[in-house]
Amino acid sequence: MTRERQAVFWFVGFTVALVSLHLLSSILLPFVAGMAVAYFLDPVADWLEERKFSRALATTVILLAFFVLAGGLLTLLFPLLQRQVVDLVKMVPGIIESIRMEAIPWLERLIADLPPETMEDIRNAAKDFAGKAVKWITNVAAGVWSGGVAFFNMLSLLVITPVVAFYLLRDWDLITAKIDSWLPRQPAPTIRAQFLEIDKTLAAFVRGQAMVCLTLSLIYGVGLTVVGLKSGLLVGLGAGVISFIPYLGAATGMTVGLCIALFQFSEWVPIAIVVGIFLFGQTLESYVLTPRLVGDRVGLHPVWIIFVLLAGGALFGFTGVLMAVPVAAVIGVLVRFAIERYLDSPLYHGAADGGDDAGADA
């Protein structure tokens, strides 16, 4: 098979796989979650195998411990977070009313100074906005059924994910060996080297970023609770969890926390402390946590991570968000590999025999 036909074969295969993923995105969530659990627990299973555990027994012990720990943590946190969610929902109308009372006098003064033609433009814009708002409300009403579907997706996540994780973790070595046997023989060593680099990049990033999110969740949650902010633990944990998207966690947490603080406190000191907690957390993340726990060797730029998260969410929904970081790691490794090949090729050096002629010319 010529190189051209090989390229066509791989391009068609990649296109078919991408289209299939898009068509099946509504049912992929429990399988992607189960694969992620199996991938990150495989080193633990290998460690137990080295200590004379059978693979099936090691898989059973690991998954039982994992899901019992996760379930126990949720059981402990759920009642507290449930109360804070209720309190936050109760506060929302008051926060909106406070903002309205503060904004109306300012808007009235602003309108009084505007010329008539500007006011006409504002009225037209308001009409357009009203039409879009009605359309949005209609879409929300139509999405009630999709909310029911989301419930069944969550149910399938709770039921199917442990099953998928068990079988994938039990047969992980067999699956990887079988895939390895399908690789084209000549480029197989190069492909294995790139998969190894992808594995190192992905594991280092997720492990380091998980530690960053956990640390920030503790800082935000404990700090806001000590200040006495209502629903502070909920806001802090939420801001820490979404900190895997660079800067979004601190920005979202600060916005929500500041709105609650302005509504709750009459003095400026606790409000300033709330802002200071998030500024401290963001500074700590940028200059200490991310450099030490994630590091530059991972090679995933924050802008690239934000882009793939948004693209994954737009294409595949929540499943795409889960797949975004692995895809970013794969593309990052392959792009670096392609650039290395390019820099060592005649396309870069401009000579038929590559780097030798380039060195002679120098």
Image (spheres, rainbow, N blue to C red):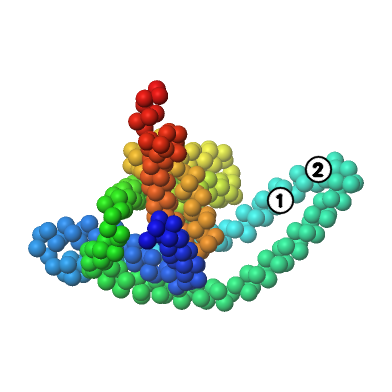
Q: Quadrant of residue 362?
A: top left
Q: Residue furthest top?
A: 362
Kindly identify which residue carries mark 1.
Answer: 101
Please state which of residues 57 and 137 is positioned toward the viewer in this rendering.
Answer: 57
- Seen at 26% across and 52% down, the residue is 189
Tell whether 154 sits left or right of 172: right
Q: List x then y, in percent, for residue 200.
A: 30, 48
Residue at far right of view: 116
For mark 2, what is the residue?
109
Residue 177 seen: yes
The amino acid marked with disc number 2 is Arg
Q: Is residue 147 above or below residue 182?
A: below
**Kind of residue at disc 1:** Met
- Which of the image's four quarters has the N terminus? bottom left
* Residue for point 34% across, 67% down: 34
Viewer-side residue, 24 vs 145:
24
Residue with the most extreme left position: 52
Q: Residues within 10 Å of mark 1 (few under 14, many from 20)?
A: few
